[in-house]
Image (cartoon, rainbow, N blue to C red):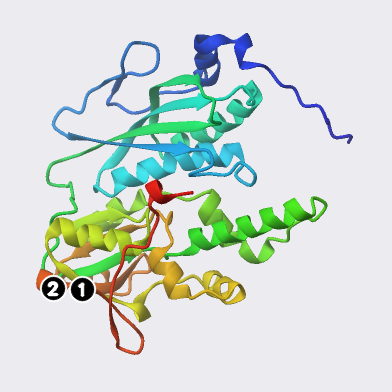
Amino acid sequence: MIEDKTPQRTSLSQLGEFGLIDHLTKNIQISQPSTLKGIGDDAAVLDFKDKKAVISTDLLVEGVHFDLAYMPLKHLGYKAVVVNLSDICAMNAKPTQITVSIAVSNRFPLEALEELYDGIALAAKIYDVDVIGGDTTSSQKGLLISITAIGEATEEELVYRTGANDNDLLVVTGDVGAAYMGLQVLEREKQVFQVNPNNQPDLDNYTYLIERQLKPEARKDVKELLQALDLKPTAMIDISDGLSSEIIHLCKNSGIGCNLYEDKLPLDPQLINTCEEFNVDSTTIAINGGEDYELLFTIKMDDFDKIKGNPNFTVIGHMTPESEGIHLITRANTKIPLKARGWNALNAE
């Protein structure tokens, strides 16, 4: 079959703003009982009755948060949704709705935005959230995506960053560092491609790392896992900016210290192998790399037996009095002050 070298490109100006909105949202279905009115009016209408509404928003900017040289638009749409839902999950709440706003330059045809919205729609379907509104406008700086996520929870279910106590155990879901190393692999292959465009990258050894970067998943399952174990965290946060940064956030918000143990960090074998290949320290990557979107939480010491041996959770440390500070305990049993060296959007180049 001969590949079409001139794919169809429909100028956005042919549709206009409202025509574009109608086109991109025509297949969106409503499934949440709390959605009384979605797209099509001046505002969405939600009904949570006796539950609390939880709202979070994120802005993704081309050249700062993503590079379209290796980020497919469908993956970008999916990821934009997931990173927002992760914040709702970090409150121990159930994600229910999102709004989607985009600013786009004239280099993007309609077909590109269709790809983006295909990813958004797929994430909405998989995570069972309704797309209930948003905005579109033009941009002179490439592509910008802003998503607001809305969730619900009872007051008893909600978990904040402020509830951790001395002697609580520090627990993380999944593994850490893989998304950052996936980004390093993609950046390396981009540089190789720029030197030799005929070079085709062989990414078979990095599939997990790249998936963690291009198609992360929010841990919506953790709320149900914890409920089944009759376990409520004392504090919780998601790992978007790096494990060290999030631990410091928890400690500062709760007014306590922490000991994090290097030998307890959950690392995927692919991460360890790739760190060796890149000649970087896997612990440094694990505690400073961002975009894992795992959940970091604290539990009472008495609840340890409830998660002991559970493959979803790893105890990586314990909380201490604030006066003792925040430290990494190395494999050699050396105590090192933990620094926030994770992602800082305002320092991004």
Determine which residue is flagged by label 1.
318
Quadrant of the frame with the N terminus: top right
Q: How many marks?
A: 2
Is residue 74 shown left or right of residue 222?
right
Q: Residue at x 30, y 57 (%)?
A: 225
**Residue 18: horizontal and vertical position, in percent?**
49, 10
Q: Residue at x 36, y 42 (%)?
A: 85
**Residue 308: horizontal and vertical position, in percent?**
27, 74
User: For residue 167, which numbered disc appears in the image?
Assistant: 2
List the single residue furthest toward the right: 2
Secondary structure, mark 1, is strand
Question: Does the rendering let one see residue 231?
Answer: no
Q: Are marks 1 and 2 in contact (CB under 8 Å)?
A: yes
**Residue 184: horizontal and vertical position, in percent?**
57, 60
Q: Is residue 226 above or below residue 302?
A: above
Q: Residue at x 26, y 63 (%)?
A: 247
Going by the numbered disc 1, the residue's amino acid type is: His
Of label 1 and label 2, which has the lower sequence position?
2
Question: Does the rendering let one see residue 293?
Answer: yes
Instruction: Residue 177: name its quadrant.
Output: bottom left
**Residue 339: horizontal and vertical position, in percent?**
30, 67
Which of 307 and 189 lies nearest the eye of the viewer?
A: 189
Q: Residue at x 35, y 46 (%)?
A: 86
Instruction: Residue 277: name its quadrant.
Output: bottom right
